[in-house]
Structures are given as C-alpha cells and as structure tokens.
Image: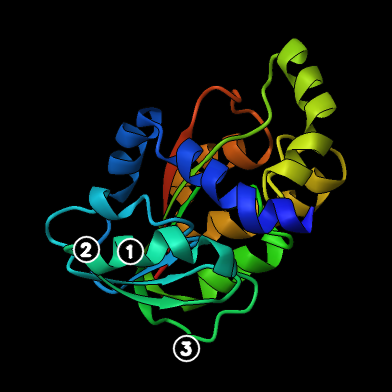
Amino acid sequence: MCLYHHCVFPYLLDLAMGSRVFDKPRRRTLARASGRILEIGFGTGRNLPHYPPGVSRIEAIDPDTDLDRFSLPRIATSRVAVDFHHLNAEHLPFAGDSFDSVVCTLTLCSIPDVVHALGEIHRVLKPGGQFLFLEHGLSPDARVARWQHRLNPIQNRLGGGCHLIRGDGAAGRRIRPASAGCRTLLPAARAQIRRLHDGRVRVEVLSACCCRKKTH
C-alpha cells in the first residue's frame, strides 16, 4: 500500500477531484469566502479556480506531501496567493479567533479525528467567522447504504482514508457530539448540520453548508 499511496493514489485523487460534477458545488461553497481564509485539506489544489474574485490570498494546509506534485504547480500559476503548510487539521498552530473563513471541501470524510478537527476549526475562527464546507454522507436509502457498508473498507484503504459510512455506528457516536458543538456556530444551520453529521444525506448528493461562529 505504501507504493500505491506514493505513486498511484495522488493521480487517482486529482483525476476524481477534477471531475466537472464538483465545479458548481465548489463555486457555491466558496462564494462566501472572505477576509483571512484558511483552507483545510488543500489536496491537489482543485479549489483554487473557484474562489470568488475578491479573494486574493489564502492559507492552506494538507498533511500529504505526495500531493505536492499537483498542488505546488497550481499554486505557482494561481491568481490567488497561497501560504501553504504541511499540517493536519487536528492540531492547528494558529492563534484562536484568527480567521474570518475556514473552508473544507470533501475532507471531513478522511480526517482521522474529525471531532478534534471541528474543535480546532471552531477555535481559530473569529467571532462571526464562517465555516464553509462541502461533504458527502451515508445514504438514507437502505439499499445504497448497504453497498456503502460493503465498500467502505475498500474505499478507506484505496481512497486515502475516506469513509463512505461516517455518521453511522462507531463513527456516528464520535461525530454526533461534534455536530452538537458545530451547531453553536450558527443556530439557524442546525437542520443542515444534523442532516450532514447524522447521516441523512444521500451519497449521490453533495451537501454544502455555512456555519457562523457566535459572537459573544
């Protein structure tokens, strides 16, 4: 698997993330990004063309150095300047209340400790700051969900830790407390957050949400 992850997975990931099916969801998710921006899970840099014209600089993190062969050339040619760091989302070295927007697209499914990561996102957001995220989840259709359960071990190994069933079973017990914490960002988003983290999102539908950190 080491050879696969270093030599094959980066190409498969970039190919999949470059699908046009993600273009509109990306633009819709990133349309509100403003101020000082942190992107969690920068990956191969596929979000860069979709930031609105008003965005000129972002900070971005991703722990996977094998993706640099795709991300660094895109950074070099992007109109958006990127301060890039090899970091994971569970331990952000930034001061609290320091970002106006945190962006996360198709990444929560693969973060090992997503509960801790959501806590870190909440910490670094300024009061009134926004968490913009795009994710997939467990289907409410029992037939689709059964196939997700069957394929999840394979997807997890071949897809860089991606979980098709996050929000169910042991994963669900870990994420539900996080969803309760995430709801403190924006009371009006409670239904959306529940839909994402409690698994009531069809796997074929991408869910884009915006949460705003409460001001004190």
Image spot of residue 12 (x, y percent): 56, 41
At which x and y percent is residue 135? 53, 41
Instruction: From the image, tell me which residue sits under label 3.
Output: 95
User: Mark number for residue 73?
Assistant: 1
Residue contact between numbered discs 2 and 1, judged by CB atoms under 8 Å: yes
Where residue 119 sits: x, y (%)?
Answer: 61, 69
The answer to whether mark 1 and mark 3 are in CB contact below 8 A is no
Q: Against 165, is 79 above or below?
A: below
Residue type indicated by callout 1: Pro
Residue closest to the far top: 143
Q: Quadrant of residue 147?
A: top right
Q: Depth check: 95 or 81 in front?
A: 81
Identify the secondary structure beneath mark 3.
loop
Is 141 placed left or right of 83 in the picture? right
Residue 169 lies in quadrant: top right
Tell me the residue that label 2 is attached to.
77
Residue type for callout 2: Thr
Q: CA distance from mark 2 to mark 3?
A: 29 Å
Please, is residue 167 above or below residue 176 in the view?
Answer: above
Residue 89 relative to residue 158: left or right: left
